[in-house]
Image (cartoon, grey):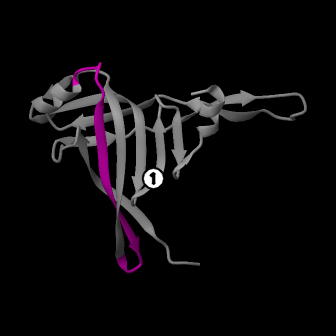
Amino acid sequence: MGEIKINRITNANCYVEGGSLLGQVKEMDAPEVKFKMAEHGAIGLVGSIELPSGIDKLEGKIRWNSLYVDVLKTLSNPFTSVKLQFRANIDQYQAGGIVAQIPVVIYMTAQMKGVPAVNFKQHDNAEVETTFGATYYKLTIGGVDVVEYDAFANIYKVAGVDTLAGYRANIGG
């Protein structure tokens, strides 16, 4: 058995339209790529099974540590998409300590779902949250494409393999 490797992600940065928001974002929730599953039962099967039938909408959140005018101007139009990028670092440990630092990047095309409300509380920093829907999502780890999804182009790739190429060809698009 090989030596145990432990991966830890303890920090990240957010970019909007290529601009770094270092120090402005308190917390980020990247969208989960969640599959729609449909139950299937048929004569001859002793049980029911679930089979994939699509991909659910992608939603995420960004929690800000304050209001930033330039960011709000970029994110407040629901009719335009913005390029979001979440960048993180995996610290990989083995028994002797850290053995590698691996980049993690999530690329997204997103539309904001509203202008954030501000919660005020005496002596506390204001809390501000933006929710968004994404139509494009790509996860790379260590420069390797893990998952890529484009809702408008009907593309879903896993490790670079286009799993919907046959589907697109069959429907003529």
Q: Is residue 118 magenta?
A: no
Q: At 53% across and 40% down in the image, what residue appears? A: 156
Q: Count of labels shown?
A: 1
Dividing the picture into quadrants, the one containing residue 122 is top left
Q: At 28% across and 54% down in the image, what residue appears? A: 11
Q: At 86% across and 34% down in the image, what residue appears? A: 45
In the rendered image, which quarter contains the C terminus? top right
In percent of width and height, residue 172 lies at 61, 27
Dividing the picture into quadrants, the one containing residue 7 is bottom left
Which residue does the numbered mark 1 point to in the structure image? 145
Q: Residue furthest bottom?
A: 96
Task: State the SS at label 1.
Answer: strand
Between residues 20 and 47, which one lies in front from this camera angle? 20
Taking the image as shown, residue 149 lies to the left or right of residue 74, namely right
Q: Is residue 46 above or below residue 119?
A: below
Dividing the picture into quadrants, the one containing residue 68 is top left
Q: Residue furthest right?
A: 44
In the rendered image, which quarter contains the N terminus? bottom right
**How many C-alpha atoms fall within 10 Å of the one at disc 1: few (<14), some, or many (≥20)?**
some
Is residue 68 visible in the rendered image? The answer is no
In percent of width and height, residue 56 lies at 52, 29
Between residues 73 and 114, which one lies in front from this camera angle? 73
Q: At 15% across and 26% down in the image, what residue appears? A: 73
Instruction: State which region is magenta.
Output: 76-97
Between residues 18 and 39, which one lies in front from this camera angle? 18
Taking the image as shown, residue 138 lies to the left or right of residue 101, namely right
Query: Mark 1 is on which residue type?
Result: Asp
In percent of width and height, residue 2 lies at 54, 78
Please identify the dominant SS of the magenta region. Answer: strand
Is residue 79 visible in the rendered image? The answer is yes
Q: Is residue 77 magenta?
A: yes
In percent of width and height, residue 5 lies at 46, 70
